[in-house]
Image (tube, grey):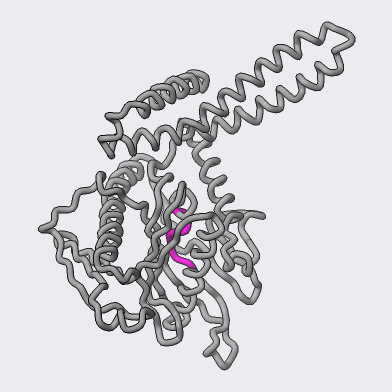
Amino acid sequence: MSMEEKLKRAALRLQEVELLLSQPEVYADPARLRDLTREQKELEPVVIAFRELEAARIMQREAEGMLADPELRDLAREELLEARERQNRLTQELKLLLLPKDPDDGRSVILELRAGVGGEEGALFAADLLRMYLLYADSCGWQADVVHRSDTELSGVKEATLTVEGAGVYARLKFEGGTHCVKRVPETESAGRIHTSTATVAVLPEAEETELYIAPEDLRIDTYRSGGAGGQHVNKTESAIRVTHLPTGLVVECQDERSQYKNKDRALKILRSRLYARQQAESEAARAARRKSQVGGAERSERIRTYRFQEKIVVDHRLTGEHKSYPLGPVLDGDLDGILDALTAQQQTEKLLQKAND
Protein backbone atom coordinates (compact mmCIF):
# COMPACT_ATOMS: atom_id res chain seq x y z
CA MET A 1 0.00 0.00 0.00
CA SER A 2 1.39 3.41 -1.00
CA MET A 3 1.83 6.24 1.51
CA GLU A 4 -0.95 8.17 -0.24
CA GLU A 5 -3.39 5.29 0.27
CA LYS A 6 -2.40 4.99 3.94
CA LEU A 7 -3.01 8.71 4.45
CA LYS A 8 -6.45 8.59 2.83
CA ARG A 9 -7.38 5.59 4.96
CA ALA A 10 -6.20 7.40 8.07
CA ALA A 11 -8.38 10.41 7.23
CA LEU A 12 -11.44 8.20 6.71
CA ARG A 13 -10.76 6.26 9.90
CA LEU A 14 -10.47 9.47 11.92
CA GLN A 15 -13.93 10.50 10.69
CA GLU A 16 -15.29 7.11 11.77
CA VAL A 17 -13.66 7.34 15.21
CA GLU A 18 -14.97 10.87 15.79
CA LEU A 19 -18.46 9.72 14.82
CA LEU A 20 -18.26 6.78 17.23
CA LEU A 21 -17.06 9.06 20.04
CA SER A 22 -20.14 11.22 19.54
CA GLN A 23 -22.42 8.28 20.40
CA PRO A 24 -23.55 8.03 24.07
CA GLU A 25 -23.39 4.21 24.20
CA VAL A 26 -19.61 4.30 23.71
CA TYR A 27 -19.22 6.03 27.08
CA ALA A 28 -20.92 3.07 28.78
CA ASP A 29 -18.02 0.83 27.71
CA PRO A 30 -14.77 2.10 29.38
CA ALA A 31 -12.50 -0.26 27.44
CA ARG A 32 -13.93 0.76 24.05
CA LEU A 33 -13.87 4.43 25.01
CA ARG A 34 -10.21 4.11 26.01
CA ASP A 35 -9.27 2.39 22.74
CA LEU A 36 -11.14 4.89 20.56
CA THR A 37 -9.69 7.89 22.39
CA ARG A 38 -6.20 6.46 22.04
CA GLU A 39 -6.76 5.83 18.32
CA GLN A 40 -8.06 9.36 17.84
CA LYS A 41 -4.91 10.82 19.43
CA GLU A 42 -2.72 8.70 17.15
CA LEU A 43 -4.63 9.60 13.96
CA GLU A 44 -5.02 13.34 14.51
CA PRO A 45 -1.38 14.41 13.87
CA VAL A 46 -1.25 12.20 10.77
CA VAL A 47 -4.42 13.68 9.27
CA ILE A 48 -3.44 17.25 10.15
CA ALA A 49 -0.07 16.83 8.40
CA PHE A 50 -1.82 15.18 5.42
CA ARG A 51 -4.18 18.16 5.05
CA GLU A 52 -1.22 20.54 5.20
CA LEU A 53 0.49 18.47 2.49
CA GLU A 54 -2.59 18.70 0.26
CA ALA A 55 -2.70 22.48 0.83
CA ALA A 56 0.97 22.73 -0.21
CA ARG A 57 0.21 20.78 -3.39
CA ILE A 58 -2.61 23.19 -4.24
CA MET A 59 -0.24 26.08 -3.56
CA GLN A 60 2.28 24.55 -5.98
CA ARG A 61 -0.30 24.12 -8.76
CA GLU A 62 -1.48 27.70 -8.37
CA ALA A 63 2.09 29.01 -8.45
CA GLU A 64 2.84 26.98 -11.58
CA GLY A 65 -0.23 28.54 -13.20
CA MET A 66 1.09 32.03 -12.51
CA LEU A 67 4.50 31.44 -14.12
CA ALA A 68 3.14 32.34 -17.57
CA ASP A 69 2.22 35.85 -16.35
CA PRO A 70 5.34 38.11 -16.59
CA GLU A 71 4.02 40.40 -13.85
CA LEU A 72 3.48 37.53 -11.40
CA ARG A 73 6.48 35.39 -12.35
CA ASP A 74 8.79 36.47 -9.50
CA LEU A 75 6.04 36.01 -6.91
CA ALA A 76 5.15 32.65 -8.45
CA ARG A 77 8.75 31.43 -8.21
CA GLU A 78 8.89 32.35 -4.51
CA GLU A 79 5.61 30.58 -3.79
CA LEU A 80 6.67 27.58 -5.85
CA LEU A 81 9.91 27.25 -3.87
CA GLU A 82 8.01 27.59 -0.57
CA ALA A 83 5.41 25.00 -1.64
CA ARG A 84 8.07 22.46 -2.63
CA GLU A 85 10.02 22.96 0.60
CA ARG A 86 6.82 22.54 2.61
CA GLN A 87 5.94 19.35 0.73
CA ASN A 88 9.40 17.87 1.34
CA ARG A 89 9.20 18.68 5.06
CA LEU A 90 5.67 17.29 5.43
CA THR A 91 6.49 14.15 3.45
CA GLN A 92 9.37 13.35 5.81
CA GLU A 93 7.19 14.14 8.82
CA LEU A 94 4.47 11.81 7.54
CA LYS A 95 6.95 8.99 6.92
CA LEU A 96 7.83 9.16 10.61
CA LEU A 97 4.20 9.43 11.71
CA LEU A 98 3.30 6.33 9.68
CA LEU A 99 6.04 4.19 11.22
CA PRO A 100 4.77 1.33 13.43
CA LYS A 101 4.30 2.69 16.92
CA ASP A 102 4.89 1.10 20.28
CA PRO A 103 1.32 0.58 21.53
CA ASP A 104 2.44 1.59 25.02
CA ASP A 105 3.91 4.99 24.03
CA GLY A 106 0.89 6.98 25.18
CA ARG A 107 0.80 5.44 28.67
CA SER A 108 1.86 6.71 32.07
CA VAL A 109 4.63 4.71 33.75
CA ILE A 110 5.81 3.03 36.91
CA LEU A 111 9.53 3.78 37.34
CA GLU A 112 11.56 1.59 39.68
CA LEU A 113 15.04 2.50 40.90
CA ARG A 114 17.48 0.19 42.71
CA ALA A 115 21.01 0.74 43.93
CA GLY A 116 23.42 -1.66 42.27
CA VAL A 117 27.11 -2.33 42.89
CA GLY A 118 29.07 0.09 45.03
CA GLY A 119 27.35 -0.17 48.41
CA GLU A 120 26.51 3.21 49.92
CA GLU A 121 27.89 5.05 46.89
CA GLY A 122 25.49 3.11 44.65
CA ALA A 123 22.62 4.16 46.91
CA LEU A 124 23.70 7.81 46.82
CA PHE A 125 23.83 7.62 43.03
CA ALA A 126 20.31 6.14 42.98
CA ALA A 127 19.20 9.16 45.04
CA ASP A 128 20.74 11.45 42.41
CA LEU A 129 18.81 9.64 39.67
CA LEU A 130 15.56 9.85 41.63
CA ARG A 131 15.98 13.60 41.97
CA MET A 132 16.81 13.85 38.25
CA TYR A 133 13.61 12.06 37.22
CA LEU A 134 11.43 14.09 39.57
CA LEU A 135 12.87 17.33 38.14
CA TYR A 136 12.41 16.11 34.57
CA ALA A 137 8.81 15.09 35.21
CA ASP A 138 8.11 18.52 36.71
CA SER A 139 9.63 20.28 33.68
CA CYS A 140 7.34 18.24 31.40
CA GLY A 141 4.23 19.04 33.42
CA TRP A 142 3.77 15.40 34.46
CA GLN A 143 2.53 14.25 37.85
CA ALA A 144 5.26 12.27 39.62
CA ASP A 145 4.78 10.68 43.04
CA VAL A 146 7.18 8.52 45.05
CA VAL A 147 4.99 5.69 46.34
CA HIS A 148 7.73 3.61 47.97
CA ARG A 149 11.23 4.49 49.08
CA SER A 150 13.83 2.70 51.19
CA ASP A 151 16.71 4.92 52.34
CA THR A 152 20.16 4.25 53.78
CA GLU A 153 21.60 5.96 56.85
CA LEU A 154 23.50 8.44 54.62
CA SER A 155 20.35 9.47 52.68
CA GLY A 156 21.04 7.13 49.80
CA VAL A 157 18.23 5.19 48.14
CA LYS A 158 18.26 1.40 48.30
CA GLU A 159 15.15 1.25 46.13
CA ALA A 160 12.32 3.55 45.13
CA THR A 161 9.13 3.31 43.10
CA LEU A 162 7.41 6.30 41.53
CA THR A 163 4.39 6.77 39.34
CA VAL A 164 4.70 9.29 36.51
CA GLU A 165 1.39 10.27 34.93
CA GLY A 166 0.86 12.30 31.77
CA ALA A 167 0.43 12.09 28.02
CA GLY A 168 3.17 10.14 26.23
CA VAL A 169 5.30 9.55 29.33
CA TYR A 170 6.34 6.03 28.27
CA ALA A 171 7.38 7.25 24.80
CA ARG A 172 10.06 9.36 26.52
CA LEU A 173 11.04 7.47 29.66
CA LYS A 174 11.20 4.00 28.07
CA PHE A 175 14.77 4.84 27.01
CA GLU A 176 15.80 5.15 30.68
CA GLY A 177 15.44 1.45 31.45
CA GLY A 178 18.76 -0.29 32.06
CA THR A 179 21.95 0.03 34.12
CA HIS A 180 23.27 3.53 34.86
CA CYS A 181 26.93 3.87 35.94
CA VAL A 182 28.67 6.63 37.86
CA LYS A 183 32.41 7.30 38.02
CA ARG A 184 33.36 9.69 40.82
CA VAL A 185 35.30 10.07 44.05
CA PRO A 186 32.95 9.17 46.91
CA GLU A 187 32.70 11.58 49.86
CA THR A 188 33.96 8.79 52.11
CA GLU A 189 37.04 8.15 49.93
CA SER A 190 40.07 9.71 51.67
CA ALA A 191 42.62 8.68 49.01
CA GLY A 192 40.78 10.46 46.19
CA ARG A 193 40.32 7.33 44.10
CA ILE A 194 37.55 7.20 41.50
CA HIS A 195 34.99 4.48 42.15
CA THR A 196 32.47 2.97 39.72
CA SER A 197 28.99 2.34 41.06
CA THR A 198 25.70 1.48 39.43
CA ALA A 199 21.95 1.81 39.78
CA THR A 200 19.28 0.07 37.76
CA VAL A 201 16.14 1.63 36.32
CA ALA A 202 13.03 -0.24 35.20
CA VAL A 203 10.31 1.63 33.31
CA LEU A 204 6.96 -0.14 33.13
CA PRO A 205 3.98 1.07 31.09
CA GLU A 206 1.00 1.52 33.39
CA ALA A 207 -1.65 -1.12 32.77
CA GLU A 208 -5.31 -0.22 33.09
CA GLU A 209 -7.71 -2.26 35.16
CA THR A 210 -9.76 -3.22 32.10
CA GLU A 211 -6.69 -4.73 30.42
CA LEU A 212 -5.55 -7.16 33.09
CA TYR A 213 -7.77 -8.94 35.60
CA ILE A 214 -6.28 -10.04 38.91
CA ALA A 215 -8.33 -12.59 40.84
CA PRO A 216 -8.81 -11.55 44.50
CA GLU A 217 -7.91 -15.07 45.65
CA ASP A 218 -4.49 -14.64 44.02
CA LEU A 219 -3.60 -11.80 46.39
CA ARG A 220 -2.33 -11.61 49.96
CA ILE A 221 -2.63 -8.12 51.41
CA ASP A 222 -0.77 -7.15 54.59
CA THR A 223 -0.82 -3.84 56.45
CA TYR A 224 1.99 -2.34 58.51
CA ARG A 225 3.08 0.95 60.00
CA SER A 226 4.84 3.13 57.49
CA GLY A 227 8.16 4.80 58.22
CA GLY A 228 9.44 8.25 57.40
CA ALA A 229 7.72 11.63 57.66
CA GLY A 230 4.21 11.88 58.97
CA GLY A 231 4.42 12.53 62.70
CA GLN A 232 2.34 10.61 65.20
CA HIS A 233 -0.11 9.47 62.52
CA VAL A 234 2.58 7.30 60.95
CA ASN A 235 3.36 5.57 64.22
CA LYS A 236 -0.22 4.84 65.24
CA THR A 237 -1.89 3.81 61.98
CA GLU A 238 -1.13 0.75 59.87
CA SER A 239 -1.66 2.63 56.62
CA ALA A 240 1.18 1.06 54.60
CA ILE A 241 0.24 -1.82 52.30
CA ARG A 242 2.15 -4.87 51.11
CA VAL A 243 0.50 -6.82 48.27
CA THR A 244 1.79 -10.27 47.28
CA HIS A 245 0.70 -11.89 44.03
CA LEU A 246 0.70 -15.55 45.03
CA PRO A 247 1.00 -17.18 41.55
CA THR A 248 4.14 -15.20 40.64
CA GLY A 249 5.53 -14.18 44.03
CA LEU A 250 5.64 -10.51 43.01
CA VAL A 251 5.52 -8.16 46.01
CA VAL A 252 4.54 -4.47 45.95
CA GLU A 253 4.74 -2.08 48.88
CA CYS A 254 3.16 1.36 49.08
CA GLN A 255 3.36 3.80 51.99
CA ASP A 256 3.11 7.21 50.32
CA GLU A 257 -0.45 8.01 51.35
CA ARG A 258 -1.88 8.25 54.86
CA SER A 259 -4.98 6.46 53.64
CA GLN A 260 -4.76 2.67 53.67
CA TYR A 261 -7.31 2.56 50.84
CA LYS A 262 -5.23 4.89 48.63
CA ASN A 263 -2.06 2.91 49.31
CA LYS A 264 -3.86 -0.31 48.39
CA ASP A 265 -5.16 1.24 45.17
CA ARG A 266 -1.67 2.41 44.19
CA ALA A 267 -0.08 -0.91 45.10
CA LEU A 268 -2.56 -2.77 42.90
CA LYS A 269 -1.87 -0.34 40.05
CA ILE A 270 1.87 -1.05 40.32
CA LEU A 271 1.29 -4.80 40.55
CA ARG A 272 -0.95 -4.69 37.49
CA SER A 273 1.76 -2.83 35.56
CA ARG A 274 4.42 -5.36 36.61
CA LEU A 275 2.25 -8.26 35.48
CA TYR A 276 1.50 -6.45 32.20
CA ALA A 277 5.23 -5.86 31.65
CA ARG A 278 5.89 -9.54 32.35
CA GLN A 279 3.32 -10.55 29.73
CA GLN A 280 4.85 -8.14 27.22
CA ALA A 281 8.37 -9.42 27.98
CA GLU A 282 7.29 -13.03 27.46
CA SER A 283 5.70 -12.13 24.13
CA GLU A 284 8.78 -10.14 23.08
CA ALA A 285 11.09 -13.00 24.12
CA ALA A 286 9.15 -15.36 21.89
CA ARG A 287 9.36 -12.89 18.98
CA ALA A 288 13.08 -12.32 19.61
CA ALA A 289 13.75 -16.07 19.61
CA ARG A 290 12.00 -16.41 16.25
CA ARG A 291 13.90 -13.41 14.90
CA LYS A 292 17.26 -14.74 16.14
CA SER A 293 16.63 -18.11 14.54
CA GLN A 294 16.18 -16.33 11.21
CA VAL A 295 18.77 -13.54 11.24
CA GLY A 296 21.07 -14.28 14.18
CA GLY A 297 21.74 -11.92 17.08
CA ALA A 298 24.42 -10.17 19.07
CA GLU A 299 24.82 -9.64 22.79
CA ARG A 300 24.63 -6.06 24.10
CA SER A 301 25.79 -4.71 27.44
CA GLU A 302 23.15 -3.75 29.97
CA ARG A 303 25.01 -0.50 30.67
CA ILE A 304 23.24 2.31 28.89
CA ARG A 305 24.81 5.46 30.35
CA THR A 306 27.80 6.61 32.40
CA TYR A 307 27.92 9.77 34.53
CA ARG A 308 31.58 10.90 34.67
CA PHE A 309 31.96 13.47 37.42
CA GLN A 310 35.66 14.21 36.89
CA GLU A 311 35.06 15.09 33.22
CA LYS A 312 31.63 16.63 34.02
CA ILE A 313 29.95 14.75 31.18
CA VAL A 314 27.26 12.12 30.71
CA VAL A 315 27.92 9.51 28.01
CA ASP A 316 25.04 7.52 26.56
CA HIS A 317 26.51 4.31 25.14
CA ARG A 318 23.64 3.77 22.69
CA LEU A 319 24.47 6.97 20.80
CA THR A 320 27.39 7.90 18.58
CA GLY A 321 29.26 10.99 17.46
CA GLU A 322 28.20 14.43 18.66
CA HIS A 323 25.02 13.01 20.22
CA LYS A 324 26.91 10.73 22.61
CA SER A 325 28.01 13.20 25.35
CA TYR A 326 26.10 15.80 27.38
CA PRO A 327 26.99 18.25 30.21
CA LEU A 328 26.67 16.50 33.58
CA GLY A 329 25.15 19.32 35.64
CA PRO A 330 22.10 20.08 33.47
CA VAL A 331 21.34 16.37 33.04
CA LEU A 332 21.34 15.72 36.79
CA ASP A 333 19.11 18.79 37.15
CA GLY A 334 16.51 17.11 34.94
CA ASP A 335 17.46 18.32 31.45
CA LEU A 336 17.02 14.98 29.66
CA ASP A 337 15.42 16.25 26.44
CA GLY A 338 18.68 16.34 24.48
CA ILE A 339 19.46 12.69 25.23
CA LEU A 340 15.87 11.50 24.74
CA ASP A 341 15.46 13.45 21.48
CA ALA A 342 18.63 11.82 20.11
CA LEU A 343 17.49 8.34 21.16
CA THR A 344 14.05 8.90 19.64
CA ALA A 345 15.58 10.10 16.36
CA GLN A 346 17.92 7.10 16.31
CA GLN A 347 15.02 4.71 16.84
CA GLN A 348 13.04 6.38 14.05
CA THR A 349 16.01 6.12 11.68
CA GLU A 350 16.41 2.42 12.48
CA LYS A 351 12.71 1.85 11.77
CA LEU A 352 12.95 3.71 8.45
CA LEU A 353 15.96 1.62 7.40
CA GLN A 354 14.22 -1.57 8.45
CA LYS A 355 11.12 -0.57 6.50
CA ALA A 356 13.22 0.21 3.42
CA ASN A 357 14.87 -3.24 3.62
CA ASP A 358 11.61 -5.15 4.09
Q: Does the magenta segment cover residue 130?
A: no
Residue 167 or residue 320, whichever sits in front: 167
Q: Position of residue 192 (x, y in %)?
A: 60, 88
Vertical position of residue 63 compared to residue 250: above or below: above
Q: Is residue 223 left or right of residue 181?
A: left
Q: Quadrant of residue 262?
A: bottom left
Let me know if residue 118 appears in the view.
yes
Q: Is residue 190 left or right of residue 202?
A: right
Let me know if residue 1 appears in the view.
no
Residue 30 or residue 23, whichever sits in front: 23
Q: Quadrant of residue 330?
A: bottom right
Q: Residue at x 27, y 29 (%)?
A: 25
Q: Residue at x 71, y 27 (%)?
A: 85
Q: Position of residue 78 (x, y in %)?
A: 81, 22
Q: Position of residue 138 (x, y in %)?
A: 53, 60
Which region shows up in magenta?
174-180
Q: Residue at x 45, y 82 (%)?
A: 155
Q: Position of residue 149 (x, y in %)?
A: 37, 73
Q: Residue furthest top?
A: 68
Q: Residue furthest bottom?
A: 190
